[in-house]
Image (cartoon, rainbow, N blue to C red):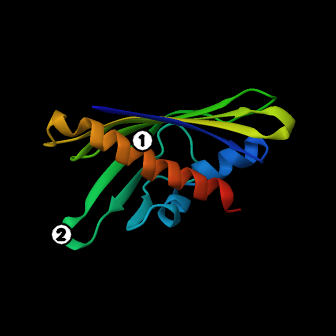
Amino acid sequence: MSFITFERTAPLPPEEAWRRLTEWPRHADAVPLTRITVLTPAPTREGTRFVARSGVGPLSFDDVMEVTVWQPPAGGEAGLCRLEKRGRMVLGWAEIEVRPGPGGRSRVVWREELRVRFLPRAFDGLLAHMGRVMFGRAANELLRRP
């Protein structure tokens, strides 16, 4: 498995950073060649399931995720969302933590453990690097766009 972690500081209050990062359909605009389908009714909560379909035509795959922890930031406390990846090809988990930062800003910590079925462990380093780049850019875009 590849472990991915990065942090961002956003000039947003924690509640707004949280909203931007956890409105799942917005991720489709931030990750090229990806569509998001939410499978459960709103609002997001523990048990919410969605699918990120990435790729083109027969070279596509589904990343099926379920929210297992849903604690939005409130009252000056950090928020935490944990997603379990339950697809046929993509396995692991992701956590998005949003903490209050100095001057009304937010501190975002993204942690992810990612495994792609049938991909040899020799590729873990490359997968981790690509994940940091791709998810880091997506987080930047999500935090930048209202």
Q: Which residue is mark 2?
A: 58
Question: In which quarter of the view is residue 98 placed?
Answer: top right
Q: Is residue 63 left or right of residue 58?
A: right
> Reading the chain from its start, which is encountered first: label 2 or label 1?
2
Q: Residue at x 21, y 40 (%)?
A: 123
Dot in front, 2 or 1: 2
Q: Is residue 13 left or right of residue 71?
A: right
User: Which image quarter holds the C terminus?
Assistant: bottom right
* Residue 27, position as x, y percentages in the image: 51, 58
Q: Residue at x 47, y 52 (%)?
A: 40
User: Which image quarter holds the N terminus?
Assistant: top left
Residue nearest the observer in this picture, 22 or 109: 109
* Residue 116, position as x, y percentages in the image: 23, 43
Q: Examine the rendered structure and indicate whether residue 71 appears above or below residue 140.
A: above
Question: In which quarter of the view is residue 124 placed?
Answer: top left
The alpha-carbon separation of the residues under discs 2 and 1 comes to: 24 Å
Residue projecting furthest to the right:
103
* Residue 94, position as x, y percentages in the image: 44, 37
Asked whether the viewer can see residue 83, the reply is yes
Identified by mark 2, the residue type is Pro
Q: Examine the rendered structure and indicate whether residue 145 appears above or below residue 91.
A: below
Question: In which quarter of the view is residue 33 placed?
Answer: bottom left
Q: Residue at x 33, y 62 (%)?
A: 54
Asked whether the viewer can see residue 43, the reply is no
Q: Secondary structure at mark 2?
A: helix
Residue nearest the observer in this picture, 67 or 42: 67
Residue 66: which disc? Answer: 1
* Residue 10, position as x, y percentages in the image: 71, 46
